[in-house]
Image (cartoon, coloured by chain):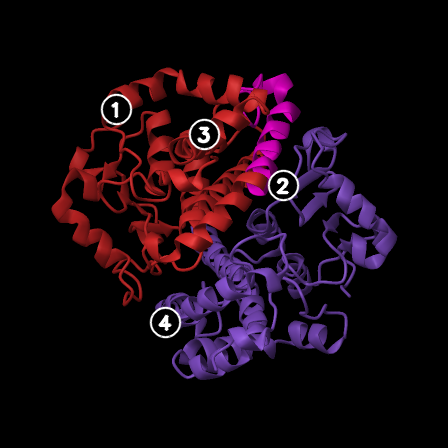
Chain colours: A red, B purple
Amino acid sequence: MSQPQSKRQKTDAQYELLYHPTIPGRGEFIRLAFQATGTQYSDVANEDHSKYKLVQDTCSPESTGDKDGNPPPFAPPALRVHGAGKDGKSLLLSQTPNILLYLGPKLGLAGSADYEIYHVNQLALTALDLANETHDTHHPIAVMKYYEDQKDAAMTRAADFRENRIPKFFSYFERNLKSNEGSGQGKYLVGSKLTYADTTLWQVLDGLFFAYPKEMQARAKEYPLLFDTFYPSLKAEKWLKEYLDSGKRLQFSNGLFRNYPELDRQ
Amino acid sequence: MSQPQSKRQKTDAQYELLYHPTIPGRGEFIRLAFQATGTQYSDVANEDHSKYKLVQDTCSPESTGDKDGNPPPFAPPALRVHGAGKDGKSLLLSQTPNILLYLGPKLGLAGSADYEIYHVNQLALTALDLANETHDTHHPIAVMKYYEDQKDAAMTRAADFRENRIPKFFSYFERNLKSNEGSGQGKYLVGSKLTYADTTLWQVLDGLFFAYPKEMQARAKEYPLLFDTFYPSLKAEKWLKEYLDSGKRLQFSNGLFRNYPELDRQ
């Protein structure tokens, strides 16, 4: 799945991603940062489903922290970084944008100038907000209840999402690509090379193509930098093409992004 | 409102907060970081309501960036930092947690050890998620529609929020205080001194006391570190007491936190 960078064995990776198995979900934003940079990492519960218990224990609603002195996470994904915490013990991080923020400079995905990491971060945060709002279209009332039990509210919320929120978000990303066109040529949001803002936004757009195919087809022509340049050129980058072709990338199904045709443009 | 730290005049502050006037909203999380550290800043639209146009222009849905080469924000709040951007020009930042992340180390609100900023950040992100979920209880369907037009959905969502989400979030913060009790004595979430995780969580709890007074009264006894120690001890800190007593703090009304008695515990 990734190229080894050190002598560590796969079972002894520096980076351990702790997330639910089988679904892309929020874990995929972190996987993409590793994939884009050929960084070795252990995807604990996917490599061995029996290890899902480790994820559950780490993120347990009873946890008051781990043996290395780390505070408890709110929810998966979490990332354990061996040797990076207190007194050389492990560092445990949670919250998707926080994990990306930590990895960004270490993996060379946070821009060049010092201040660029904040522009990368604000774009990634906004892309993740869009992912959350996409989730809320199929679960507007209660995350733990079935879609079928909140379908009426979902229909109304999805209509608002398509008519008002999608244009607001897409306009923002289009204008950011425009703002950076001199350096990024429409291919990169910040500066002249790939950052975790790009990988994160790409995954959200790809999820939206799965969840709202008709809406996306209709909207694509309104945002030419986003859909004629950014999305396809990133998809064609060698590392992403190989990852998508490898069959190792987890498929969208019943998670953050869901395809309910009745929520899509009719 | 704040103590000057330099020879700059108030109208020439290094930090310019660009946010809607009259409401606390998401701007208040940033104001609290300045207040806690006696840092001079300009609250542009509140100091002079006629300057709200500057906020609107900066965050315009047509903007492709400013004259200093900064990318456009998604929405207020934004922060302009004079002299901190490209070639000594201004740096413009957006996204509340991103602005706090930038200010944290500069104002001494990001912990001590290098890795602590990531623990501070993950806690602040989760507190801001709780603020967003509070907002969504009164606007579960569409942010731009009236509450009255989504009241039925709001009633159902608020019930789920009170019964499931509030305990999940409060348990998380209680366990973080427990995890850090040796250093923070229940007063601080990370380490032994104030961070922006504390100021951010405090403001969210205070907003919840305004929005859901009955629910909060019932819940308070379940989370002793959070409500017997953290919330009151921070409220009693000299800087916060003075700020609250000054009358300069903007009051909750019809923003992120709203008091609709029918959504509260009955």
User: Label for residue B181?
Assistant: none
- Of the residues tagged 3 and 2, which is closer to the observer? 3
**Crowding near pointer 3: few (<14 within 10 Å), some, many (20+)?**
some
Q: Which residue has dot 2 on it?
A: B74
Let me know if residue A195 appears in the view. no
What secondary structure is marked by label 2? loop
What secondary structure is marked by label 1? loop
* Three-letter residue code for mark 2: Phe
Mark with earlier residue (4, 2):
2
Residues at marks 1 and 3, common chain? yes
**Is A47 placed left or right of B15 in the picture?**
left
| Image location (x, y in percent) of residue B162 | 43, 71
* Three-letter residue code for mark 3: Lys
Whole-Å distance between the Cαs marked 4 and 2?
Answer: 36 Å
Whole-Å distance between the Cαs marked 3 and 4?
Answer: 49 Å
- Of the residues tagged 4 and 2, which is closer to the observer? 2
**Is B156 placed left or right of B46 in the picture?**
left
**Which residues are drawn in magenta?**
A164-192
- Of the residues tagged 1 and 3, which is closer to the observer? 3
* Three-letter residue code for mark 1: Gln
Say whether marks 2 and 1 touch (CB < 8 Å).
no
Say whether marks 3 and 4 touch (CB < 8 Å).
no
Q: Which residue has dot 3 on it?
A: A214
Whole-Å distance between the Cαs marked 1 and 3?
Answer: 37 Å
Q: Which residue has dot 1 on it?
A: A3
**Is B169 placed left or right of A47 in the picture?**
right
Residue B104's place in the image compared with B69, above or below, is: below
State the image quarter where residue A243 is shown.
top left
Of all chains, the one bearing label 2 is: B
**Crowding near pointer 4: few (<14 within 10 Å), some, many (20+)?**
many
User: Label for residue B178?
Assistant: 4
